[in-house]
Amino acid sequence: MYLYRITGMIMKNRTIALLVLLVALSVSTKTYSQNDEPDYNPIQTVVPWLTIAPDSRAGAMGDAGVATSPDIYSQHWNPAKFAFIDGKGGVGISYIPWLRNLVPDINIAYLSGYYRFDTKQVMSGSLMYSSYGKIEFTDDGGATQLIVNPNEWAVDLGYSRLFSDNFSGGVAFRFIYSNLTHGYPAQGEDTRPGLSIAADISGYYHKDLTLLDKNSLFAFGFNISNIGSKMSYTESYADFIPMNLKLGSSLSLDFDRFNRITFTIDLNKLLVPSPDSTITEEQNISVPEALFKSFADAPDGFMEELREITYSYGAEYWYNNIFALRAGYFHENTYKGNRQFFTAGAGFRMSGFTIDFSYLMPVALNHPLARTLRFSLSFDSSALRNASKR
């Protein structure tokens, strides 16, 4: 609904229409209208960049991260994992040149960190920032009226706690800001930045096992993310932010003290109304109602609900806890957005520093996400302190 209404509002301004299209492409490689086939029915929300994998590790494993081992970027995937992280504190930064096949100046940056109070409690925080470069507003005659730099960002504060030797829980609170028009009016209606407040509720369980005579670790995680208020850019309407359910599991095997491999899978489902080609009132329902109805409101019934689930498959190999190789695959149903791509990447860790990168390879040719790179750098305070003493 966000794409339809905003596009209709600014149909006389080609520059902004292009901007909205680019934002929508981060969720879907196709647009949807009532003239499309009924089976093609992708879910669309405002601020879809909140669901983009911000870090290179998960980005190299098919965007899977809810049940992988804890790291500095756990805030995005599953805040509960921080309760099991090694170390007293750390910080990480990641950078993504986004949609470079289309435009040269869309960027996403992510800053995340944590601090351990004691053996059971950890505080965490993050900042995700998305910039859309320089946008030019013009009048009906094509004369420049205003040049702006649209941007969106979200800041988080999280808390995680151990409840047992194997289970932890976590919550995160998020403030979201989206400024796409800088107040420029559209069809006589004033615009404003979109604001929303949201929360995540998460859990993480892991258990040591012996599999094939090897030390192994099984893990399961969940995160209900972006549970929050709708966002409005005008007085006329408000749209849902990407409330989302993440479920994931992983299995790690230690072949010896130098070699370790992990396999993981994530399932994601947006907890917002499914679009209906004959009904345009789905945005009028409340947030709590949307959370529950999202499991049974698809026009084509249960089979369409299954099509709304995306799948992420990933594998990670570590040698001596110093060098990592990663690969993955992301699958979204053809009629729900059609994002399907392979990923690969590597990581290097030494003396408290970790450097990661990933590369995205879409199945379709000339895909807007082709050749997407992610770069991440993180610092572990405990490891840095130990290296300094040595």
Image (cartoon, rainbow, N blue to C red):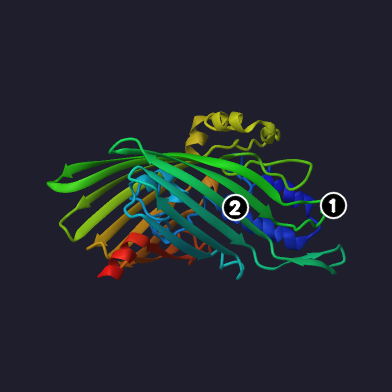
Residue 269 % position (x, y): 49, 40
Find disc 2 in the rendering and name its residue. 30
Give amino acid for label 2.
Lys
Note whether 362 is above or below 244 in the view shown. Answer: below
**Observer able to see residue 63:** no
Left or right for 97, reference 72 = right
Please name the residue shown 35% across and 53% down the image.
Answer: 314
Please name the residue shown 56% across and 68% down the image.
Answer: 100
Towards the viewer: 185 or 351? 351
* Residue 230 image-quadrant placement: top right
Note whether 138 is above or below 35 in the view shown. Answer: below
* Residue 281 image-quadrant placement: top right
- How dense is the environment of label 1, judged by Cα within 10 Å: few (below 14), some, or many (20 and up)? few
| Label 2, label 1: how far apart the Cα atoms are | 26 Å
Q: In which quarter of the image is the N terminus?
A: top right
Please name the residue shown 78% across and 54% down the image.
Answer: 10
Residue 222 % position (x, y): 41, 39
* Label located before the other in sequence (2 or 1): 2
Towards the viewer: 327 or 39? 327
Looking at the rendered image, the disc whose residue lies closer to the viewer, 2 or 1, is 1
Note whether 322 is above or below 292 in the view shown. Answer: below
Give amino acid for label 1.
Gln
Please name the residue shown 58% across and 37% down the image.
Answer: 272
Residue 35 % position (x, y): 68, 44
Callout 1 secondary element: loop
Towards the viewer: 27 or 134? 134
**Observer able to see residue 126:** yes
Find disc 1 in the rendering and name its residue. 187
Q: Which residue lies furthest to the left in this view?
A: 213
Residue 210 % position (x, y): 16, 43
